[in-house]
Structure formats: structure tokens, C-alpha cells
Image (cartoon, rainbow, N blue to C red):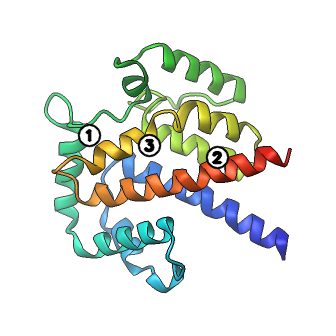
Amino acid sequence: MVVDEEHMAHQLRANTYSLLAHLFVAEPNMQTLALLGSISEQSTVKKTSISMAWVRLFDVARAMDVAVISAEFQQLFIGVARGELMPYGCYYQSGFLMDKPLVVLRQDLQVMGFTRQANSHEPEDHVAALCEVMALLVREHRKEQFDFFQKHLNVWMPKFFKDINDTPSACFYQAVALLGTAFFQVEETFMGMSNDGK
């Protein structure tokens, strides 16, 4: 029973990272919105920060039109020359793109056996790429997930989520950022407890 609950918890963690990666790599399509909108709020009975964040995302997915969300994504992250926000770790850690934090990240990814996909147009420090790596580390129960989270995600993504929440043009992505913020708080607690148990 305990093993099943632990497995489900890790599966939920991995799925949440995958969802964040999916929502930040491109605007969600109708199928994604329909899936989010169809999830019953009864599945989040307990009133915790993360359960309320899930409910908010479900509500927004049901209420917003896919074209409006697409326009929001373009304005926030793409723009004409650039979007309102920069979803890259280097920018948040050093103020520049393609800087030293990306070099360190690439070295760590190489050590862990991850290689850049040939068809990828974004650097490895993009928020979606980092969340996808975390999803893989969690699914494979790899112990590197603890250091990787603290070193390459938690060091800047909470500020990124806050910036989304503070951006007036964000609506759907405010809900995504709310989930990210609550999820990272849960992850911090989980990482601390897991490290204490080593």
C-alpha cells in the first residue's frame, strides 16, 4: 500500500513536470485544454495551495478560448523581437543569454547522459527543457534529481513564475505560474525530506 502511494506520488510529480514543459514549449491546443477542463475538481478535495492552483488551472482551461491563449503565449514568450518575459535560466541567473550557467548546465546534462535533440530550436536552459529533464529524472527514480532541481530549476524558476503573475497581459499563464509556484514549494519540502532520509 505504501509502495503504491509512493509510486503514485512520483508519477504525479513527473506528470506535473511534463505538463509544465508542455505548456511552456508551445501554446496548448484544444485537446490539452479539453483534458484540463474535463478534470473534476472533486479530485482536489483538500484545500492546499497546490490543490487550489490545480482548480484555478482547470477553471481557466474551461473558460478561455484557445485562440486567446495562443495570442497570450505569443505576447508573453515570443513577441516580434522578443516576448515580455524571457523563459531562460541564463537570463535570470546572469542577465544574459547563452552565458556561463548554460555551460554548467550542458556539462551536467552530458554527465547524466542527456543529449540535445537535433530538431530543438531552444537552448537547454529553456523552462520547458528543464522541466522535461526533471520529468525523466523522476520517472527513472534517479538520485540526480535532487541536485538538478536545486541547481538548475529552483534557483530561478520561482522568480520567473512571479514575473508571469505580475504581468498584466497574462491570464491563462498566471494560472500555470500559480501551479508552478505551489508545485515548487511542495518539491522543496519533498527534496528536503528525501535528503534527510539518505
Residue toward you, 116 or 52:
52
Secondary-structure class at tag 3: helix
Name the amino acid type tagged 1.
Phe
The residue at which mark 2 appears reads as: 136
Query: Mark 3 or 2 closer to N-term?
Result: 2
User: Would you say the residues marked 2 and 1 are in contact, meaning their CB atoms lie under 8 Å apart?
Assistant: no
Relative to residue 100, is residue 34 depicted above or below?
Answer: below
> Which callout, 1 or 3, points to the residue nearer the camera?
3
Picture disc at residue 158: 3
Which residue appears at 29% of the width and 47% of the height?
A: 164
Which residue appears at 53% of the width and 58% of the height?
A: 16
Name the amino acid type tagged 2.
Leu
Quadrant including the C terminus: top right
Horizontal side of 34 relative to 118 (left or right) equals left
The residue at which mark 1 appears reads as: 77
**What is the x, y in percent for residue 1?**
84, 77
